[in-house]
Amino acid sequence: MKPYHFAKSWIKFGRWRIRRLKAALVWGFTPLRNAPSVFGNSMPKSGSHLLAQILKGLTGLGPFINPGLPPVNRSEGNQPLPEGAVLTNIHRMQPGDIRYGYIHAKEPFLSLLTEPGRATFFLYRDPRDMLVSHVFYATDMNPSHGMHQYYTQRLHSMEERLNAAIEGVDEPGYELSSVCGRYDAYLGWLEQPEVLCLRFEDLTLEQEAALGRVMDFLERRGFTPCVSRSQAVATLQGAIKPRKSGTFRKGQPGDWREHFTQKNKARFKAVAGDLLIRLGYEPDNDW
């Protein structure tokens, strides 16, 4: 770790401890000890920053703390962490802490994030919109992305980039799983009864109902809000500030229709099979 990132990390850890003390003084030490630790899990480019903003809104409702730390699977310099370091970050969470990350549905994470005292959320998105968001992010928004040069120097159209993102890439210097490979790594979360699974589309199009589900889940996990349901939902809605996300582009469900060509549709159907049907986005492959 670079000295700058090392120092920044320790400053953030110090700030986290101060925030925990402040939360205990405001809400009480016993309520803080009894609060669940909250974890927001998501696939990349599926609304993770939206979910993180919503969960951070909990700090206005009870003894919850936003530690101000990076995703549990990323370093202060935004580099992937080894599994051992990710586990350490999750084990380090204390009652009331709010963290987020991009964690595959496999052991030991499945058991760890569903144990008593935790409230884990999993957010997923229409794979077609996820692919469009990924391509725009890697091509236009993040020059340091691992696929940036491939998309900008080797490929020359949105159609080509989407097909590459659908099929996956396995060339020297460029590795990208197919759309099925990416989803298969996360879909096990949908089978966990102790995890609240949310669709990105519900958090944007049916927001009040979806946030009501968030509150219901937290109450089942041990949190008792001191305000009415409508006030709690309004507080969480007020925490949503899309423009404050450095990765925000459009966030509009169904945006894929503006970018998928007939060739992209055919390639997606050939590669993804019944993925959209399994996720509930289409009744069949006639779309």
Image (spheres, rainbow, N blue to C red):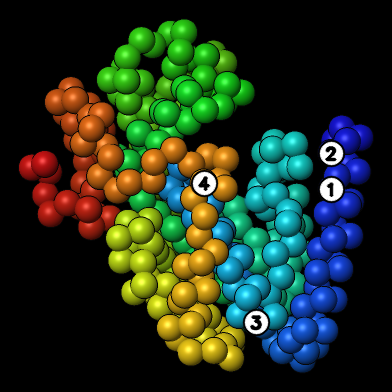
What residue sits 57% from the left and 21% below the top?
Answer: 143
Quarter residue 131 falls in: top left
The type of residue carrying mark 2 is His
Q: How much space separates mark 4 and mark 3, taking CA atoms?
A: 26 Å
Q: Nearer the viewer, mark 4 or mark 3?
A: 4
Q: Earlier in the sequence, mark 4 or mark 3?
A: 3
90 relative to 133, above or below: below
Q: Secondary structure at mark 2?
A: helix
Residue 177: in sight, yes or no?
Answer: no
User: Which residue is depicted at the point 68% across and 53% down?
Assistant: 72
Q: Earlier in the sequence, mark 3 or mark 1?
A: 1
Work out whether residue 284 or residue 203 is closer to the camera in this orientation and state it.
203
| Other residues around mark 2 within 10 Å, as few (<14) / some (14–19) / many (≥20) | some
Q: Nearer the viewer, mark 3 or mark 1?
A: 3
Residue labelled with disc 2: 5
Residue marked by disc 1: 9
Q: CA distance from mark 1 to mark 2?
A: 6 Å
Circle on res. 62: 3
Q: Are marks 4 and 2 in contact (CB under 8 Å)?
A: no
